[in-house]
Amino acid sequence: MFELTDQPIDAAMLRARLVRPDAGACVVFEGWVRDHHAGRPVTLLEYEAFDELARLEGEAIVTEAEGEHPGCVVLCVHRTGALPVGELAVWIGVASPHRHAAFLACRQVIEAIKRRLPVWKKEHHPGGVAEWVNCTTEPTAPPARCGRLLRTPGFAARSGRVRPGSPRLSQRAGRRDWRAGMSGGALSRHVRGGTSDAG
């Protein structure tokens, strides 16, 4: 299951939702807002999501992980809105009969979230400076596609306005460009199938 929320993440409550009698392992990943990035101090992060497609693609990512690691049950929650340093930005929990599959599924989900989810962040620095930054992956992860997506023509449009450097987008332009960028992926398969059902 995948969820977006603009409320603080309750890790204990989420972990309790994964408890089941056949599970012998629970692997959890927590992504926190840190106070620096690329050598610069960070005071606040703002997360913005293309809600409809983020939920659809997030659910697809979770379903893929559960399918590739039988027995695993995955729960992923991603924050939106303004987050101070130390706040939970993303929480992923995997319950499984055995630890090996749980570790693999958890890593798979966070790397896919970084590469594929239409969620962006704006970093705030001391002195009132703020900038949108691209999503990234760890050095061992496959290459990210987010840079290409953010450069797609029309991808920064919203409500008839274009703001250079902003990932904000209109429902119409953003849906078209995101689908084009995700061709061949799980989201495209949903779209070609004529359904918006994330389940």
Image: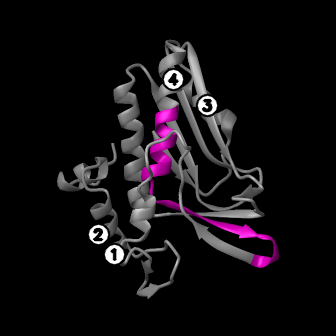
The Cα atoms of the two marked residues, 4 and 2, are separated by 35 Å
Mark 1 crowd level (few <14, some 14–19, many ≥20, 10 Å Cα): some
The residue pinned by badge 1 equals: 173
Q: Decide whether residue 115 is among the magenta residues.
A: yes
Q: Which quadrant does the C terminus fall into?
A: top left
Give the x, y percent position of residue 8.
Answer: 68, 51
- Check if mark 4's residue and mark 1's residue have beta carbons within 8 Å: no
The Cα atoms of the two marked residues, 3 and 4, are separated by 9 Å
Name the residue at the left extreme: 193
Looking at the rendered structure, the secondary structure element under dot 1 is: helix
The picture quadrant where one finds residue 126 is bottom right
Q: Residue at x 33, y 75 (%)?
A: 173
Give the x, y percent position of residue 53.
Answer: 38, 58
Q: Residue at x 48, y 47 (%)?
A: 113
Q: Is residue 91 visible?
A: yes
- Nearer the observer, 197 or 183: 183
Q: Which mark is residue 28?
A: 3
At label 4, which amino acid type do we have? Ala
Range of residues picked out in magenta: 107-128
The residue pinned by badge 4 equals: 102
Q: Decide whether residue 162 is among the magenta residues.
A: no
* Horizontal arrangement in the rendering, residue 19 relative to residue 84 (left or right): left
Give the x, y percent position of residue 94.
Answer: 53, 28
